[in-house]
Image (spheres, rainbow, N blue to C red):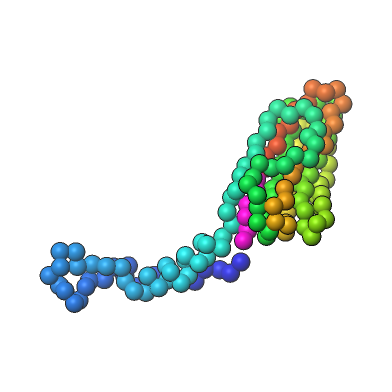
Amino acid sequence: MDTIANPPIGDSVVETDERSRTRKEPFYMAKSWIVWLFESLVPRVQVASQWLTKVTLTAQSASIIATAIPLPALAAGEYRISLYGRITTPDSLGSSLTVTAGWTEGAVAIPKSSPAATGNSTSTTALLSELVTIDRATSLTYATTWAATTGDGRYKLIVTIEQVN
């Protein structure tokens, strides 16, 4: 993404209306600042990413099959899907967590998984963040693969979606 132009910090933000010095409100925004706002700042903000949704699941004790993220029908384009999984209760003998994102591009279903997080502590995380191009009106999905030796481990999952353009 392009960087934003520097604001005209050498110019005053307000100017006096020289045409009518007797006006009750004789000040207005300086032209250099108006130009910067409408030609640099506003266009940059309009193309910035937009956070669409966040899904938070806690105390999970089983794998999650591919699940559509609750969103309205999406336009074709670029989106960022991010998944964060963390072991919140270690299994007494060991566990493994993998997070998976799914999308459709060019009528092809594409899954992408994180490496398995196999540490068995509350600082063990499985992370995945992908910039994806999707077809119109297709679902973005999340899934997890969870294996806990004794079954007493737990994890949490946070999924976020951003529209990039």
Q: Residue 6 at x, y = what percent?
A: 47, 70
**Residue occupying image coordinates x 15% and y 64%:** 24
Residue 142: quarter of image: top right
**Residue occupying image coordinates x 79% and y 44%:** 100
Question: Which residue is farthest left?
Answer: 22
- The answer to whether 121 appears left or right of 75 in the picture is right
| Residue range corresponding to the magenta coloring | 160-165
| Count of picture labels | 0
Q: Nearer the viewer, residue 120 or 77?
A: 77
**Predominant secondary structure, magenta span:** strand
- The answer to whether 149 appears left or right of 102 in the picture is right
Q: Residue 93 at x, y = what percent?
A: 86, 25
- The answer to whether 161 appears left or right of 29 in the picture is right
Is 117 above or below relative to 162? above
Which quadrant does the N terminus fall into?
bottom right
Is 28 above or below relative to 67? below
Residue 119: quarter of image: top right
> Residue 132: within the magenta?
no
- The answer to whether 108 appears left or right of 72 in the picture is right
**Residue occupying image coordinates x 12% and y 70%:** 22
Residue 163: quarter of image: bottom right
**Residue occupying image coordinates x 20% and y 76%:** 18
> Residue 164: within the magenta?
yes
Residue 123 appearing in the image: no
Q: Residue 133 at x, y = what percent?
A: 72, 59
Residue 91 appearing in the image: yes
